Image (cartoon, grey):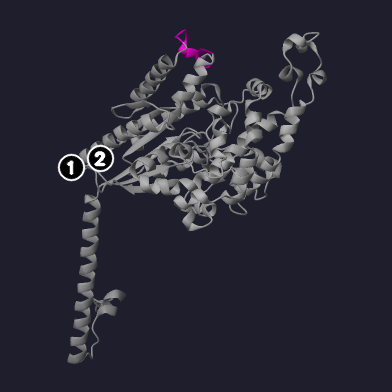
Amino acid sequence: MPVSREPADRDPLTAALRPPIDETEEEKAHRLAEEEAAKRVSLAIDEAIRLEDKQRKKRKLVRLLLLGQSESGKSTTLRQFQRLYTPNAFREERILWRAVIQLNIVRSIHTILDALTDIRRRDVYPSSIYTSDPDSDSESEHHVALPFHLENLRRRLYPLRHVESLLIAKLVPPNEHEATTLGVGGSNSVNGNVSSSGSGHSLPSSVFHHQEVFVRPGAAWKLRTSGRPQSAGTTGQETIDESQAVLHRCCSDMIALWNDPIVRQILRRRKIRLEESPGFYLNDLNRVTSLSYFPTDDDVLKARLKTVGVSEYSFHMEAGPETGTEWRIIDVGGSRSQRPTWVPFFDDVNAIIFLAPISAFDQTLVEDRSVNRLEDSVLLWKEVCSNKLLAKVDLVLFLNKCDILASKLRSGIRLAKYVRSFGDRPNEPEVAEKYFRSKFSAIHREHSPIPRKFYGFCTSVTDTTTTGGIIASVKDMVVREHLRASKLL
C-alpha cells in the first residue's frame, strides 16, 4: 500500500496563517501591508521594553529594610529618614500626628488610673505607721480605699474616656479588628508558621481599652485625622478640635495626678515605667495640651502608633552627590505573628538596619510573657545573620534605646541580675553598651555565611541630633556599597 504523507501545514497555527488559496493581488497587497504594520508595532514594543530595562539598570535605586521586634524603634527610624531627607513633606504632616499624640497622652493617664483600682495599705501609707508587720496581715487587710484627693482626680478625669473613643474612631476605620486581635500568639521565627483563631467577632470594649491601637500602613489614617485638606499646613495651628479642648481643661488635673507622690509610689511598686515607654508626654502637659499646640519634630518622633502590615516609603535625594537616587525604605511588622512575612522582602535588598532595644533586658514580650525581650532580639539577630538569602547584604545594627538603658542602670537596676554573662562588670551604661556590641558582633562574625564587615551603632532614635549623624553615616555607607555592587565606583 502507498504510504500517505501528512501535509506540511498540519499544524493548526500554520494553517491559520496560510494565505487563502483564492487570494487576489489586491487582497495580498492589503494583507502584506497589515503584516508590515504589525511588525513595526511589535519592533517598537520590543525597543521600548529594551530601553526601559536599560534605564532601570542605570537608575540608582537603593532598597533598605528595617527589621526588629515590636517596639524596637523601626517606625521612629523611618520617620528620622523622612525628617532628614524630605523635610518639607515631614513638616507638612506634623499636624496630622496631633491625634496620635493626644491618644498617647490619654492612654498614659488611663494606665495610671488603672493602677489605682487595686491599691494596698503599703502603697498609700509609709511603713513606719504600721502597728504590726504589714506582710504578716491577711490579703484582705492589705486593701484600702483610694485617698480622697486621688478619687476626686479620677472622677474629674473621666471625660478622657470619651476622648479616647473619639480618637480611636478617628484612627481606626469601622469594622476594623486589628486593634483588639493582633499581637497574641504567633510564631517567633522568621520562617515560622502563624496560628490564627479565625474568629471574626469583636471583643468587649474593656478588652479593646487595654489593647494597643493598630492602623494599616499608608495615608488612610492621616486623611481621617486631617478632616480638611488645608489643615495639613500651618493653618492647623488655629484648628481646635474637641479632644484638644478636653485635654486643655483636664491639664491641671493630669499634672496633679502624674506628680502625686502616692501615684509615683504605686507605679514604682507595680514596675510601671511610663517615662521609658514610647509616646510619653506627661512631662510636657502644659505645652502639648495648649489650644494652639502644634507638634514639633521631636513630638512626632516620640509618638507611638503601631502599624499592622508593611510600610514602604519612597523618596529621592534632593541634594549632594546622590541627587536623584531613589530610596525605598521598608518597615515590616515586628510582632511574632508578622515575622514570617519578612522573607519575601529579602530579595533585591541593598542593606538591612536591625534594631535591638538593649534597654529591654528586664522586660518580656507582650505576645509571650515567658520570653525575655533581649533574648528574643539576640535570637532574631542570629537568624538574620545566618540567613543565606542575606549572605551578600550589608547588615547595620542599631543597639537602640541607649538613653533608657542608662536611666535604668543609674536608677540602681542591676544588669547582671538579668544577664548573667555580664558578670561582675561595673553597672555603667558605657560598659553595658560595649558588652552588648561585642556580643552582637560575635554573633554576626560566627553566623554570617560569608565574611562581611560589621556595622554597629549605639542609638537613641528619638534623639534628632545624634541619630541624624548616624543615619547620614549609614546612608553614605549604603550608597557606597550600592555603587560598588553596580560597578559604578
Question: x and y percent of residue 344 in the render?
Answer: 41, 44
The answer to whether any part of residue 386 appears in the image is no
Amino acid found under the numbered disc labelled 1: Leu
Residue that appears at 53% across and 45% down = 292
Q: Is residue 155 left or right of residue 9?
A: right
Q: Quadrant of the N terminus?
A: bottom left
Marker disc for residue 488? 1
- Looking at the rendered structure, the secondary structure element under dot 1 is loop
218 or 481: nearer the viewer:
218
Q: Is residue 241 left or right of residue 431?
A: right
Relative to 247, is 142 above or below?
A: above
Residue that appears at 23% across and 63% down = 48
Question: x and y percent of residue 31 in the render?
Answer: 22, 84
232 part of magenta stretch: no
Q: Quadrant of residue 371?
A: top right
3D distance between C-alphas at marks 1 and 2: 9 Å
Assess disc 2: are there few (<14), some (14-19) or many (≥20) residues with their C-alpha within 10 Å of its C-alpha. Answer: many
15 or 463: nearer the viewer:
463
Residue located beneath label 2 in the image: 482
Q: Which stretch did the figure color magenta?
A: 415-426
73 or 367: nearer the viewer:
73
Q: Is residue 188 left or right of residue 489?
A: right
Question: x and y percent of residue 193 in the render?
Answer: 52, 40
418 part of magenta stretch: yes
Amino acid found under the numbered disc labelled 2: His
Q: Is residue 474 left or right of residue 156?
A: left
